Image (cartoon, rainbow, N blue to C red):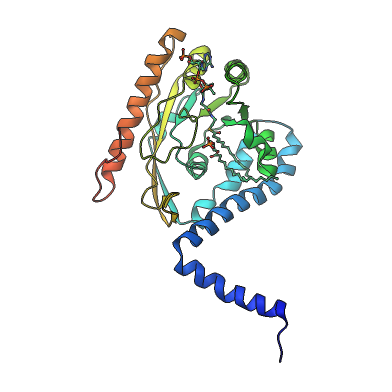
Amino acid sequence: MELSVAQWLLVVCLVAFPLLYEWSVSFKYFCKMAFYNGWILTLAILAIPICAVRGRNVENMKVLQFMLLHIKYLYGIKIEVRGWENFNIKEPYVVVSNHQSSLDLLGMMEILPSRCVPIAKRELMYAGTAGLACWLAGVIFINRKKTDDAISVMTEAAETMLKEDVRVWVFPEGTRNHSGSLLPFKRGAFHLAVKAQVPVIPVVMSSYKDFYCKKERKFTTGKCTVRILPGVHTKGLSSDDVPELADRVRGMMLEAFSQMSSERPGKGPGGVH
Ligand SMILES: CCCCCCCCCCCCCCC(=O)SCCNC(=O)CCNC(=O)[C@H](O)C(C)(C)COP(=O)(O)OP(=O)(O)OC[C@H]1O[C@@H](n2cnc3c(N)ncnc32)[C@H](O)[C@@H]1OP(=O)(O)O
Ligand SMILES: CCCCCCCC/C=C\CCCCCCCC(=O)OC[C@@H](O)COP(=O)(O)O
């Protein structure tokens, strides 16, 4: 039996792909990341018609959450949550959390409170099906290149929070940070909380270093701890108090992050400043 060129190519791919996957750490990393993004884009295709029935609505965030929850099992990532009781607040609040990578989505979906929407960079709105799903779920998009626009979107969000009983999730570092520490915080989240006079609830996701590192192209199975810290109240605070509030919350998060790093077996808190 003679094989055609196409058949030969198929055989080579079928043999080469698993071999490469096993032998090359980088190839495995790229495959896993490509699948992660591709799978989210695919799931969004399913989510869009379900969400579209309700139109743009924060309740659609539950649909996205439900659809994304299984991904941790696909990647063998165990997520332990501590401090659930700190979410026992009926009224709106602002959640602030550290931002290491797009994998934060897994920790976020694990604990996402009801009627809670993230603030995201505007570029995400154009990420194909995922962008449309986010828009339908009421994700608040800001243009980071235009500070005044971003501030007015966040000011509007403060009003929406109170009027429509919505919670908001912000990554105050403003960008992904793989340094093993926390970047200085942008102040938007804290202005938002002070304007709405609602508490800030800090959430800290432990370092992914043991199982994920973009620089080293490492992506294995592993464990992540998500800690929900006690809320910080803002009643009676004004915009003058925002810098101190932001510093205080960052301090609490850094301490928790440092503690969680030192809990990793045989590891010190290295890299936390
Ligand atoms: C089925 C599957 C479907 C797919 C599902 C996918 C779901 C995905 C959802 C997850 C999305 C996650 C996305 C995460 C991101 O995109 S992170 C990036 C975007 N987020 C942020 O940037 C948030 C944090 N940024 C801020 O808060 C900034 O402050 C910002 C408002 C953006 C302005 O930034 P910048 O231009 O850099 O300026 P400064 O921070 O230096 O601020 C300038 C001065 O303005 C003051 N300020 C800031 N905000 C306000 C405000 N709201 N009101 C009044 N004043 C404000 C600030 O204090 C500065 O003044 P001072 O220096 O303090 O005097
Ligand atoms: C037709 C266009 C197709 C475009 C394909 C785009 C691929 C994107 C696919 C899926 C998106 C997955 C959603 C992951 C959500 C996580 C968002 C995220 O982590 O954004 C990064 C942002 O916080 C900070 O950005 P920078 O670190 O400043 O940069």
Taking 92 as reference, is 205 left or right? left
Residue under the point 24% across and 44% down: 268
Task: Report whether residue 179 is seen.
Answer: yes
Please provide percent x and percent y for residue 92.
Answer: 53, 22
The relative height of residue 11 versus residue 183 in the rendered view (above or below) is below
The relative height of residue 1 versus residue 45 in the rendered view (above or below) is below
Viewer-proximal residue among 177 and 250: 177
Please provide percent x and percent y for residue 250.
Answer: 37, 25
Please provide percent x and percent y for residue 107.
Answer: 47, 42
Viewer-proximal residue among 215 and 40: 215
The relative height of residue 188 versus residue 101 in the rendered view (above or below) is above
Where residue 151 sits, quadrant-wise, is top right
Quarter containing the C terminus:
top left
The number of numbered badges drawn on the structure is 0
Residue under the point 44% across and 62% down: 25
Residue under the point 48% across and 13% down: 194
The relative height of residue 175 versus residue 248 in the rendered view (above or below) is below
Viewer-proximal residue among 7 and 93: 7
Residue under the point 40% across and 32% down: 85
Q: Which residue reaches farthest bottom? A: 1
